[in-house]
Image (tube, rainbow, N blue to C red):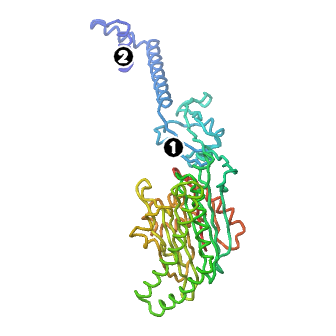
Amino acid sequence: MNDTKHEALEIFKRANINIPAHRKEAFEAFINEGQNIDSINTIIQHQAGLMAKWKEKERITEIVRQPVHMLNATVGKPYETKFDLAKLGWKDITAFEFSGLEEAGLFFDAKTKQITGTPTQSGDRKIVFKFRLEGEPDELPLHEKGLTLIINPDPKSLWKNLPNDKADPYWKEDDSTMFAPINGDRHIVVSCERGRAHANVGSYREDDFAFKDLANGWSVVVVADGAGSAKISRKGSAIACNGIVDYFLQQSTADSMEKFDKLLQQHEANSGEDTLKKINLFVYNVLGKAVFGVHKQLQEFATASGFALKDLNSTLVFTLFKKYDIGYAMLSFGVGDCPMAVLNKEVSEVTNLNWIDVGEFGGGTRFITMPEIFNSDKFATRFGFKLIDDFSYLILMSDGIYDPKFVVESNLPDMKKWKEFLADLGGKNEDKARVELRADNKDIVNQLAAWMDFWSVGNHDDRTLAIVF
């Protein structure tokens, strides 16, 4: 009764009717009349219902206006994001559905509270979130809240793949992948791919490679990376690779290499600094002649063709290897930023066969065309000799592989990074591209060519990868 009396007084006050003290008894008698009590209670109920409707309206407006950021998606890339009502503060929503997800290639899983799928088209997609609040009748239409899902285009699709000019005298095919037996019971697979940066403007692949079985049980693998800023570095890298192979195919070089057998025997019998010095001197002299010979060929070609020597700028790395009873002899040379490494049989240790020229903004890069590398006090350190009991993989790569997969020079001695690299080759990557490094794998060429097309933000240079296994 007190509530009814209080509400009656409030109603009268809002009507500017004040009840004086001497009329209170009459007023109480008035509101105690049955019909008047019913009228006041009806007013109270209508007010409560009106307030509830207003709060409901406010809550709906609050939800509709609440900013909700949806994780951006990418065409062709699996998408997954949580849509948890509790985390959004929407526990009072008892029913909901989405409109527009299916058209974007997505769907909502109520059990996992996730929006998943693989978008097929790029653009700003309008998604409608339809909902009902707790206590609302089922027959009422659902409320609607607009959401925006940004679907980015596949970054690969933004790059052009323009053909190069086949009439150019220094034309080179865009991609080359080869698989062959090497050094007896070993095999080599190597792929060299034109980078997206070159494909985008219709220019040429600057990287190159070569490999060959030589006399007396030796084999050689060569990789060269032509400088993108040089006019005909594609020719420079080709001259460098072929020049190394041609040098070691010469009979006079084969005769010189026979002397290594005796040096290694001496080293095996009397392992020490003296025999190691003799081997290192041999490597320096024989491989040094090969390197200087390539430099000279590049000079002669530049002069004859009317180019500056720097127009043929190219890095150069190569490894000679031969199997002996005591293991594999690895002779190497490197100039530039192309790593070479050998992994032991158990894939538990890595031996780097060269140090790489690196520097801030590429300022440390050196090329076989530079005369100053031959006069540098570091020239002798570019040659190497390693005796490996056995190996699982001998790997040479250009910076188009090194930069995205190893990032920095300090990762090259890290066996963990090499295992990650092998796992990547084995299919642990975004594209699930897999290369089965088996001699009986008839699809190995296609597999490696497909793997080479991996996406890496900011890394669009030519790519070369050679693997002996």
Amino acid tagged 2: Lys
Q: Give the residue furthest to the left.
A: 21
Residue 304: name its quadrant.
bottom right
Of all residues shown, which one is farthest toward the bottom? 269
Total marks placed: 2
Q: Report the front residue among 436 and 376.
A: 376
Marking on residue 436:
none
Q: Quadrant of the N terminus?
A: top left
- Residue hosting label 2: 5
User: Residue at coordinates 67% horizontally, 49% vertically from top-left?
Assistant: 165
Vertical arrangement, residue 178 with respect to residue 3, above or below: below
Residue 462 image position (x, y, % from top left): 57, 56
Question: Cα distance, mark 1 to mark 2?
Answer: 47 Å
Answer left or right for 440 relative to 342: right
Along the line of sight, the residue nearer the viewer: 151 or 316: 316
For mark 1, what is the residue?
Answer: 84
Estimate how packed mark 1 is, as few (under 14), some (14 to 19) or many (20 or more) residues with alpha carbons within 10 Å: some
Dot 1 lies on which element? loop
Vertical placement of residue 306 versus 391, above or below: above
Residue drawn 55% across and 34% down? 147
From this view, report whether residue 137 is shown above or below residue 197: above
